[in-house]
Structures are given as C-alpha cells and as structure tokens.
Amino acid sequence: MKRIRMLVNTVLAVIIIFFLSPAYAGHTPVKFEVDKSYPPFSYTSGGRIYGFTIDLANLVFEPDKFKLALSSDTWNQVYKKLVEGKIDVAAPVAIVEERKKEVYFSKPIFTRHVGLYTSKEFSKNITLKNLEDFKVGVMQSDYTETLLKEKLGVNRYYTYPTIEDLIYALVDGKIDAALMSQEIANYFLVKNGLRDRAELKIKNIFTVKSAFAVSKKRPELVAYINQRLNFLTNKGIFDELYYNYFSTYSPEYYERKNRQIVISSLYLLLIILFAASVAIFVMTRINRRLEHGKQAYEKYAQLLAENANAIVLTLNLNGEIIYFNKFAQELTGYKSEEVVGKKWVDIFIPPHRREYIENLFKRIAEEKILNNHENEIVTKDGDIKWILWNNTLIESPYLNEPMIISTGLDITQIKTTQQLLQQSYKKIERTNQELLNTLEILNRQSKALEEEKEKYKFLIENGSDCIWEIDFKEKNIEFYGRLKDLFDIKAVKSKNDFSAWLDFFHPDDRSTVFKKLQDAILLHEENLEFEARIRDKNGNWHWMSAHVQIFYNEEGKPEKIIAVNIDWTAKKEYEQKIEYIAYYDALTSLPNRKLFEEVLEDFIKKAEEEKAQGAVILIDIDNFKDINDLYGHEAGDEYLKAVCQKVLEYLKSLNLNTFFARVGGDEFAVVLHGLAKKEEVIEVCTHLLNIFESEIYIEKLERDLFASASMGISFYPDDGRSVKEIFRNVDMALSSAKENGKNDFQIFLPFMLTKNLKKIEIEKGLKKAIETDQFELYYQPVINLKDMEIHSVEALLRWISPEKGMISPLEFIPVAEESGLIVKIGEMVIEKAFSDLKEWEKKGIDYLHMAINLSARQFKTKFFENMVQKLIERYSIDPKKISFEITETGAVENFDVSLKILSFLCQMGIKFLIDDFGTGYSSLIYLKRLPIGGVKIDRSFISELEVSKENKAIVEGIILMAHKIDLKVVAEGVETKRQLEILKEVGCDLAQGYLFSKPLPKAEVEKLLIARKITV
C-alpha cells in the first residue's frame, strides 16, 4: 500500500503542475547559465546553483516579467551555448574585444584584477618576460587564456575546465604558475584553507571589466539589464549584495573579527583618556605659564604633543599647518617638513569634501570649539582613514594670530566594525524573514498533506485505474478503483483461488502473463510491467497496461502482488491509427510507397528462395493534373477512388498473388508474384489500359470522365535483386512508354540503362545551357503562294554547345519535355522571338508575322496565357502578328483545358495552327470546336506529292476541308518546283521549305525579309 500511495502522490504532483503551469504562460522565458565551479560568483551544491551571479540575476530579472531558467555547465560549454543562441544570458563574462563580435554586453558590473600565483614552495625567479620558460596554467576558454596568449605572448600553456582544477593543479605542483582573477583565487584559497600553500606572486597585471553577456538572438535584453543595474546601484542594493560576498571571505576577515571587540573597547577608553589628558594639558599650560612663564609651558606642551597616541595639529584660520606631531606623521606617511606651511585641505582632504572642510574652519572661528566631528583623510599611500576630531580656537597675547588646536583619534577600525555590524543586522533581518517564510511554507505543506490524504482516498475509490491486490498467503484477491465495476469480480472471488484472476485475460495473452509473473518470481524481481487484453462483464476486450509490484517475505517467497492497471484501449486504437496513416494512403485506402517497398522486398526474397518469378508494373495516369486543374481536386479524388476500386476488383479475380499500392500523386504500382510465364503480364497490362480508358461517372460533376495510363514493367529477380534496382528499371520503362506517345506499356530492356545515362547527361547540359544562354533562334520564311512574297517566319530553336557544337532538336527536345525544362526554354524562345520581331518592326519590316512552336507540356502550364500577355505588353507587340503552332494530338488531349487556353489567347488576336496535321490522333469535330486559324500539312505528305496519287488526294482533301471551315493551309517541307506547282494547283495558301530558304540565323534572314520577294 505504501508504494501505491507513492504512485498516487506522483500523479497528484503532475496534476498540480499541470493546473499551475498556465500561471507562467505570460512571462517571457530567459535561459540564464553560469560556470558551475566559479565561486563565489557561481557554484553548485546539492544539485542547486548558488553564488553572487545567481543572486544578482534574480534581482535583475523581475519575476512578474521574466521566467528565469537557471542552469550551469563548464565555462567553455556555457560560452559556446551563448554564441550558438542555445541560452540567452551568461555572467560574469569578461569584456574582451573578440567577444564583442559574438555576443552583446551590458554595462560593466565590476572590475576584476588578474594576477600570477605560484605555490608557497616555488622559489624560482618568475617574471612576465620569462613566462615561456615555466609551466603556466589558465582556465579553459576564460578571458585569462586570451590575455596570456595575446597580451603576454605565451603560446605553450595548460588549460583546466574549472578554477578548482586550476588551483589544485598549482598547489599539487603540476604547474609552476597560474594566471587567475585575484578575486576568485583569493576567495577559493581562503574558503578551502589553501592560503599557506599558494601566494600572489605578481598582482594587478591586468584589470578587466566584467558584465552580463547576452545572445545575439536576444538584443532586447541588453537595455533591460542596464536599466535594472542602474536601479539596483542607485538604491544601494547592488553594493549591499557585493559586500555580502566579497567582505565575508577576504584574507583579513577572520583576524578583524577577533580584533573588533578588543579594538572597539580600547578606542572608546582611549577617547576618554585623551580627553582627560588634553584637559590636564591645557590647565597645566595655563598654570605653568602663570608660574614659570611661556618658555617652560612650550617645552611641556611640545613633549606632551610629540608623545601623544593621537593626531595633534595646530593650524591658522586659513587652514595652513603650523605643527604636525609624530603620531600624525606615522599615521599619514607624511613628514612634518612636507606639510608645515601648506593647507590641510589640499593635502589630506578628498576633492569632493574640500569645500565642506573649508566651511568647517569658518565654524571653528565663530564657535571657538567644535568637538566630536568625523571625517575621512587621505594618507600618502592613498589609503582612507576615518578620524574623530576635537577642535579648539586659541587666542592669546602671546600668539601672533589666533590658532586652532585639533586633536584626532584614528577610528577607522571602529567605522569598519560599524559597517560589518550593520551588514550583520541586515543579514539577521533577512534570515528572520526567511525563517518566517519557511514557517509559512511548512504550515501550507502540512495543510496540503492533509488534503493529499483525502485526495489519495478519493483516487483509490474513484480513480480511472483498477488496482489488484493478491494475497498469496490468504489466497485472497481485492479490487479497487472505478474500473473494477466493469469486471465480474464476484465470479473470480467465489472460486476462492488466487490464480482465478487469470480468467480475466484474453486466451492468447494468459500464457504470456503467467510466464512473465513466473519468470519474475524465479528471478526474485520486484517490478514487472506488461500489456494484455482483459474481458469485461459484457464480453468486450480492453487493452490494459499493468504495473506490478511483487512483495517477498523473509524467506524470499512471494507474499503479495499489487498491480495498478491503466486502460490503454484508446491508446492502442490511436497507435493502430498512426500505423495505418504511416502505411496506407488516406484517400484510396491503398498501401503507400513505404509499405509497398517492404512487401516488394519480401516478394523478391521469396522469389529467390522458391526459384519463382514476379513482375512490378508502375502505372502513371496520363495528364491527371489537367483533371485537377479543370474540374478541381474533389473531382480528381473521386475519379482516383473509382478507378482504383476497378483495378482492385480485377486483380482479385486473377489466379496470382497480387499487391496494389499508391506510390505517388498519380502513380500506382502492382506486384504480380508467382508468374508461370512472363507473357501473363502483357494480358494484365492490356486489361489495365482498358480500365483507365473506360469512362467513369463522377457524381460531383454529373458527367463521365476518362483518361489513359502509361505503364512500365520490370521482372524480378531477373532484372534486379533489390527494391531500388526494380524501381529504377520500372521507372525507365515507364518513361519509355511515355516517349512512345503514352497510353501504352513498355517492358524494361537493358539498353534503357545506357539511354537513361545519355538522357541524364543531356538534361544536365540543358540546365547549364539555360543558365549560360546557349540557345539561338533560326528563322525559316513562310511564303504566300499567291504573290510569292514572304508572309511570316517560323522561329526554330537551336542549341549551340561550346563543347559539342550544334545539337539536334530531335535529340534534346524530348529530354526537355520529360524533365519539364521545356517550360523555361519555351518561355525564352517566345521572349527572344518577340524581341526580334519588335526590332524588325523598328527597321521598317512591319508586314511580318511570327510563328512559334509550342510543346503540349508548355501549352498546358499554369499561367501560360498570363506569361504570353505580359511579354506582349513588355515588347508592345500586335497580337495579330503572332501565331502559335501546336500538334493536333496536343490540342485534342484534355480538350476542355485546350479550349479554355486557346479561347483566351484568341480573344487577344493570337492565331493557332495545327502542326504536322494528318499524323496525329484527332477528330475533326474537336478541331471544329477549337478556335484554330489554320493547319500545317506534314512534310511526309509533301515529299511524295509528285509520285503518289494517294498523297496528292490527301493533300487536296485537307485543303478543301480546311477552306470549307475557313482555315488557312500551310505546306511544310517543300523542296522542288513541281511540288510548288501542285500546291498552287490545289489552292494551298502558304508554304515553306528548302526550295525557298533553309532556316537561317537572325542576321542572314533579315536580308531576305528586307527584299521580301522570293524567286525560285
């Protein structure tokens, strides 16, 4: 029960943290990290961080504005994290120029002095000039390392991660000297009792200011820190904190503490004795003067003053020193001849107090006596001494002028003691307040414990866990918690058998649970965890996570088992859902690429073991993007689900081991395992093509959609013995099917590897050609057959490679199409053609029309029409002078998309020609519906025009049909005069070919354009 109580307490703690955590939600977090061993600035003890820097940071960052996250590490790690932005602030950090490039600094918070320390036993002559001859150590990544290397020129030295490691290395004789901060070193030596083992050999070599260092990612913190430091300084809070740390463990601390009481008592007694002596001295002087005369008095007064254990001065009313006794000389360090005749304030009074002392002399002149006055003086060495003064003005006929006699007692030690006492009082007040706070916390905790007991009782009875307590000795089972009501506990208890609780578990889990318990008991283990299914009263199964504690008696035998059971049914369902998301496509519910690759790997291994064969079919839906663009993604998704269902139904009907998956947006893959012969794949692919070609009704659109598919085939293990190889091969086969016109399938053949490598090389060259503008436009004139004048030019792309010369378009255009580079290249062609046309217009060639070839992929690119419109506006081109040539297959494919684009551009005035007419797949009905301006008869019909009656009839028929629907006709590939004559006879409108001119560079074709008339 004790362990159950601990568990419940832990749960409650988590709940409390959960509900309290929003209280910090509005605070800005600040990650503050310090050196874990850098006392008294920072050090760790009992898992907590202490020190001056920690206390100062808590004062700087106001808790109602910032949530301070404290941490510690070695100094080099702290600074590295600060530079990388992993923490926000670190301190104290020495302000070094090279660090200003990496972090921001606040205003300096104090100055550190750097000195050279050696062990007490070290007797060699070490100076700053011969440091290279000795083993010198510094803290790793500390500012002292930078000073040693850059300022003192020492390149061979030893580094230590903490100040503690460095000092112990010094006193243990591992190094000869250590360059350290005097403040840190002195503190550590005193605190750890090492003053008699190390000493400061050379002090104050450098002075370095230290500050808060702020990450470059949090510049806003610098101004805030500076503002808070100013506030703390002005209020005296910073000074109080500083004295608390750096006066407590100074080297003279313990000696002063012992002398304070004695010194305080002695000085109080001395004041009384001295006052009495002065009174006796004055009375004696008067009596002696009356009785023995002036000479006897002066001798006595001088003797008394010289041997007094106090300062005795005589000054005139201007403050000039007349007499300066022996004690005053010893205390201040000045000899009498150095000060007599000079003004007191100029030598001994700090500048900021001089005006005040000058006014004090005036008060003495008016009031005659001014006693018990305290002020500080500066000695010859620059030390500050506090003096208690008694001042008397003497006026006598024996004196040439009035004279001030001042006696002063050194009360420096008393003032120091007062300061220490004041600090002690403040510490006591703070300690008392802390005790009161602690008492309040204890009272609250005591109250909270009572509440915890009640909560514990409530959780046991009403919590969501079900707790089982099995007593082996009594053979008794007890159940606690709300979930116990779900189970038939009475049935178990009525059996009076401690093992009857196993009946709760699923039959598949009972043996596992029993074995885990048995093994734990045999190994004498106390803790055990397992997951299993448990049946409730209604016969439903719940996944439970059991955390078991086994208790043993003195003989080592199990005495009791307590098991806390958590209902993980929802968690298990969530895990199954996550697993489904990881391995299945959300839209089609098909396996995804990850699962497909795992299954394929198993199939390949099985094929090798069984000497069997299988095939992978990679399917790509042709132009599926156009369906999404035209009808929307919802319609596209509905189409995918419908076509996938048809494919699944077909594959299930096969007498093969099949696996179907979605491996990309519009890509699918099929595994056919256990093929009797490879020819079976041909039959499957043919049927799959028919499925994709068939019309599918889309309810959202209330119409049918159809598409086509391209497929690649690769056999395993013949074509490859790994998933990577098979996918590479099947992908190349798919590319080949697309190159052959799509709506087809292709089996992988070895030559495709070589072809693919060449294709990769061409694609790489094309990318470079685009970057370095290796493309050039050639132009071929198009002739009006009525007047034999140039009507237009066709822009033809040429790739001029610096390494290979001119590369044929037949070689690089297919690669550009497949890779998608044709879109960028096509845009360059259009812009160059528009630019040249505008240039020719400026030269007076304003009759000319420009024909530009478009690829199907370029034509269907998103925003194609917007790009054309912008270029027309940029070059101020008349759209009526532009015609785009597109193949009939490209125009009819995805007819609705083509119609939309063509209609938009035609409204601007741009014409469209069907290129290579008669060679592609088209329907005259579709062509009639498209806004086409003309057709170009393919050269294959023109080349045999003279000898083939069939070709002549076809050409004549095309021209007649085109004219009937108001289309212009262009014949391409005209090379003989007889071909020209026949074309004129049958009424052809325009022609182009080598009979008139081959394609020419811009400069050469320009000459023909100026002449315009063509003679053959």
Image (cartoon, rainbow, N blue to C red):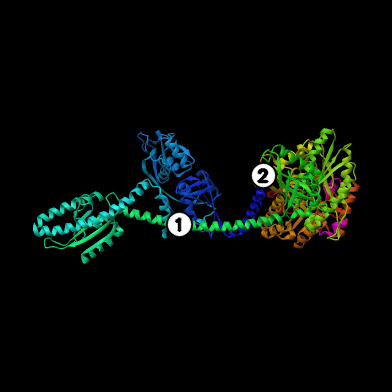
830 left or right of 142 in image: right
Cβ–Cβ under 8 Å for marks 2 and 1: no
226 left or right of 123 in image: right
Q: Position of residue 183 (x, y in %)?
A: 41, 46
Q: Visible in this render: residue 766?
A: yes
Q: Visible in this render: residue 982?
A: no
Residue at far front of view: 474
Packing grade of label 2 (10 A; few <14, some 14-19, many >=20) is few
Give the CA separation, mark 2 to mark 1: 76 Å
Dot 1 amino acid type:
Arg
Packing grade of label 1 (10 A; few <14, some 14-19, many >=20) is few
Query: Mark 2 or mark 1: which is in front?
Result: 1
**Range drawn in magenta:** 924-945
Q: Position of residue 861 (x, y in %)?
A: 74, 54
Please tell me whether mark 1 sits on a helix, a strand or a loop.
Answer: helix
Residue occupying image coordinates x 73% and y 38%: 519
- Give the camera-side residue of 147 and 137: 137
Q: Position of residue 208 (x, y in %)?
A: 41, 48
The residue tagged 1 is: 430
Q: Position of residue 740 (x, y in %)?
A: 82, 44
Dot 2 amino acid type:
Lys
772 left or right of 591 in image: left
The residue tagged 2 is: 768
Residue at far bottom of view: 366
> Going from the N terminus, do you reach mark 2 or mark 1 first?
1
Check if residue 565 falls in the magenta segment.
Answer: no
Check if residue 940 falls in the magenta segment.
Answer: yes
- Give the camera-side residue of 910 and 702: 702
Numbered mark located on residue 453 in the image: none
Please tell me whether mark 2 sits on a helix, a strand or a loop.
Answer: helix
Residue occupying image coordinates x 37% and y 55%: 421
